[in-house]
Amino acid sequence: MFDLIGAWLGSSEPRLVTAHRTAALVGAATEAEGAVQNTFGQIKDAARDAVDTASSAAGSAYGAGAEIVAERPGSALLLAGLIGFALGVVLTKGSQPPRRSRWQRIHDFE
């Protein structure tokens, strides 16, 4: 039986493979697969924990916000308006052309 794995590993000549060497390669591949699956499981668990933490934080923030709005609806409306106005100013600041001074506009007509 000729070794196709030897050719894959960089050997230019086919060589005879023993059953022991083949079993060792299969064992190493199985061990690597297990390590990859273990790492993937750890990553998946960490992501699930992060999502649960973010979800609980968002839920508590929503509850606190709902409580503030229920206690002071006028203040909440004013705060929402101010936040909206500030966002509008920030987002449209770069889209407006630069303002020309009065003297520059007068000289444009000459």
Image (tube, rainbow, N blue to C red):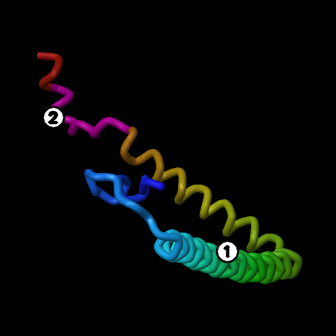
Which x, y percent locates residue 24? 50, 76
Question: Residue 56 lies in what quarter of the image?
Answer: bottom right
Q: How many marks?
A: 2
Question: Mark 2, mark 1: which one is toward the viewer?
Answer: 1
Q: Which residue is mark 2?
A: 103
Residue 74 in sight here: yes
Three-letter amino acid code of the residue under disc 1: Lys
* Distance of label 2 from label 1 (alpha carbons): 65 Å
Residue placed at 17% from the left, 26% from the top? 106
Q: Quadrant of residue 9?
A: bottom left
Residue drawn 47% across the image and 69% down it: 18
Residue at which label 1 appears? 44
Name above or below for residue 100 compared with residue 80. above
**Left or right, residue 42 beside residue 109:** right
93 relative to 60 in the view: left or right: left
Q: Which residues are magenta?
A: 96-106
Q: Is residue 71 found left or right of 13 in the rendered image?
A: right
**Dot 1: element:** helix
Residue that lies at the very extreme toward the right in this rendered image: 70
